Image (tube, rainbow, N blue to C red):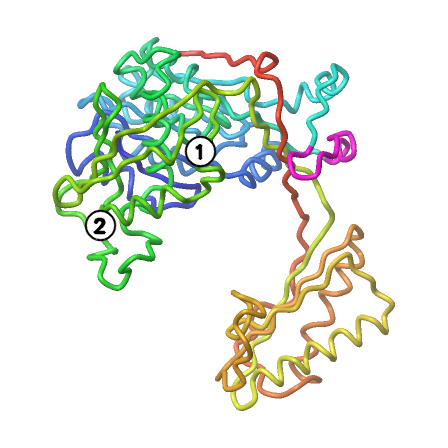
Amino acid sequence: MAAGQGFWGDWLEAPRRQVEGGEIDYLMLDYLAEVTMSILQKQKERDPKMGYARDFVGAIESILPAIAKRGVRVVANAGGVNPPACADAIRAVSERAGLKQHVRVGVVTGDDLLPRLDELLAGGHELRNMDTAAPLSMVRDRVLSANAYIGSVPIMEALRRGANVVITGRSTDTALTMAPIRYEFGWGAEEWDKLAAGIIAGHIIECGAQCSGGNCLYDWRNIPDLANVGYPIVEARRDGTFDITKHQGTGGRISVQSVTEQLVYEMGDPHAYITPDVIADFTTIELAPAGPDRVRVYGIKGRPPTDKLKVSIAYRAGFKAVGTLVYAWPDALDKARKADEVLRARLANLGLKFDQLLTEFVGVSAAHGPLTGVVQGAPEVQLRVGVRSADRATVERFTRELAPLVLNGPPTVTGFAGGRPKVEEIVAYWPALIDKRVVETKVEVA
């Protein structure tokens, strides 16, 4: 099982390199993040044929020969909020390539709860915010998307029915890897330790090269040939143990350290990594070197899942704009601070009130805030000012006040080429839980 994408926007070359670099059985492509669902929903509102990760079509086009001739099977959550349209696009590209008869597309739907939202709320499913406990009814009129995280079962069903390209909407990232492993080995619904191992395998490779040298803090200066980084591969065994490796001749590094860094990514409670299929206990994971660029993973324990599914909801939450000015030496920080002082005074004189007005001095304190201390001798400082408000006109007025500082504010502004800041709609995240029994998935294979 090879990973070929860790998010929508990942390296376009990775899928092709994974199928051409050596023998693999499955290619897993993970495209979705929480904010991605709302972006895709807005695209679908503009065009009913959109709403999926369009990069996926190019990825499939580049590996069609491997699917048709070598039997590589693909599992991806590229369907976003419109899996059927994504499937249509894949069928079209395979037909143009003269390989339509070799591509059997499976589509998993049922995660999209937006059309059912009012029905669910009326039925007593309050979809309370997991952080604030507020009921979804507070923002119902502003909801953009609502998707339940589904597990491995419908993906396995698509594979069982002969699909060699399986497209889902909002499945869990880990299910994309776990489902093929579970399907191949026939793991039962209550083999908790093995299912947990499949989940851990998925967690390790879900972010692509993040576990094979990319975005890796340990010894980062000496990670070899990142320009040619190899994406990770899971070599799984029936007993639930597996190795993490990559194709020979590729750059990057697979090590206990790199795998460990990925394991703690978005981990939460290490004793209870909750998924629709199983709860995995991260404290039981054992890692050991098993050769060059190879790490063995074993000892994993799991237990039964909860009766709930997580729901990712996005809603409209006002408007924002962010603008920047770069000030050069000497006294770059003092100039940036003075510019911020002038800007705030002018906004106050206009009577503008924002829900939030945030100033950052990039190059001095933006990344770590007050923990950084003051760097008075910085040779250049970027002043970055952001505002947010429920009123679009208020934000629009702010966008006209930054550029004048180039000539009527402190001296030595440089690199200003972006024009006025752009007003953008804010999409906020609302995590919730729902009873598993009300989410019904559907599998179609054509």
Residue 34 among magenta residues? no
What residue sits 63% from the left and 30% below the top? 432
2 and 1 marks in contact (CB < 8 Å)? no
Give residue 351's quadrant in the image: bottom right
Percent of width and height locating residue 79:
47, 28
Residue 133 among magenta residues? yes
The quarter of the rendered structure image containing the C terminus is top left
Residue range highlighted in magenta: 129-142
Give residue 104's quadrant in the image: top left
Query: Which residue, given by chain and number where applicable, does mark 2 sit on?
Result: 253
In the depicted structure, whether residue 225 falls above or below residue 310: below
Real-space Cα distance between discs 2 and 1?
28 Å
Query: Which residue, given by chain and number where applicable, does mark 1 sit on?
Result: 271
Name the secondary structure under disc 2.
Answer: loop
Q: Which three-letter amino acid code belongs to the residue tagged 1?
A: His
Q: Earlier in the sequence, mark 2 or mark 1?
A: 2
Percent of width and height locating residue 346:
80, 75
Q: Is residue 413 visible to the viewer in this orientation of the structure?
A: yes
